[in-house]
Amino acid sequence: MSKTRLPPPRPTKAIDSSLAIVNIVLLLIFFFLATGSLIASDSVEIDLPETTQLPLDLLPKPLLAVDGDAAMTLDGVPLEPGALAEALIDFPTLHVLADRELGAGVLLDLLAAEELVAVSVKLVTLHGNVVEGGE
């Protein structure tokens, strides 16, 4: 009977996983610091474009002006509810100038009630001049 000699077993080394755990913890800390600073910002600042002088007759046409009581005028002509779609039959774009006190929900409901088809709606804003020494 022949004996085969096997090499002696190698000593097993314990794998040190502490370095991997430290790396993962540091990555998590960096992740939460980065996302936390984005989420924690309370205000979003928006720079709105301003026009200092624009004659009202140079505003885009057709212009739907909606006052605080939701009364509508199209290019200066009073408009009854439900008549807007027919008045815009030849215009693909409607420019809307809404009163500052009119809520966005009211304006959206007003335009939805008109059942406009294939009409692009663009908001127009006016910048009021502030009087020195006044409000």
Image (cartoon, grey):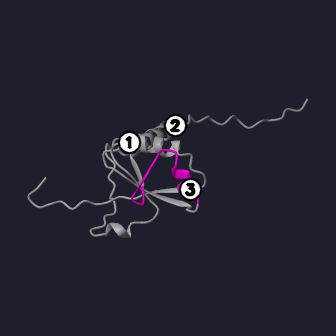
* Residue 75 lies in the magenta stretch: yes
State how far apart marks 2 and 3 are (Cα): 67 Å
Q: Residues within 10 Å of mark 1 (few under 14, many from 20)?
A: few
Q: Where is residue 31, by image quadrant?
A: top left
Q: Quadrant of the N terminus?
A: top right
* Residue 76 lies in the magenta stretch: yes
Q: Which secondary structure, mark 2?
A: loop
Q: Which mark is residue 39?
A: 1
Q: Is residue 14 above or below residue 118?
A: above
Q: Residues within 10 Å of mark 3 (few under 14, many from 20)?
A: some
- Residue drawn at (34%, 55%) of the image: 46
Please tell me which residue lies in front, 49 or 124: 124
The residue tagged 2 is 16
Whole-percent x, y for residue 87 in the image: 53, 56
Whole-percent x, y for residue 95 in the image: 45, 59
Q: Which secondary structure, mark 1?
A: helix
Whole-percent x, y for residue 73 in the image: 41, 53
- Residue extent of the magenta highlight: 74-89
67 sits left or right of 4 in the view? left
The residue tagged 3 is 119
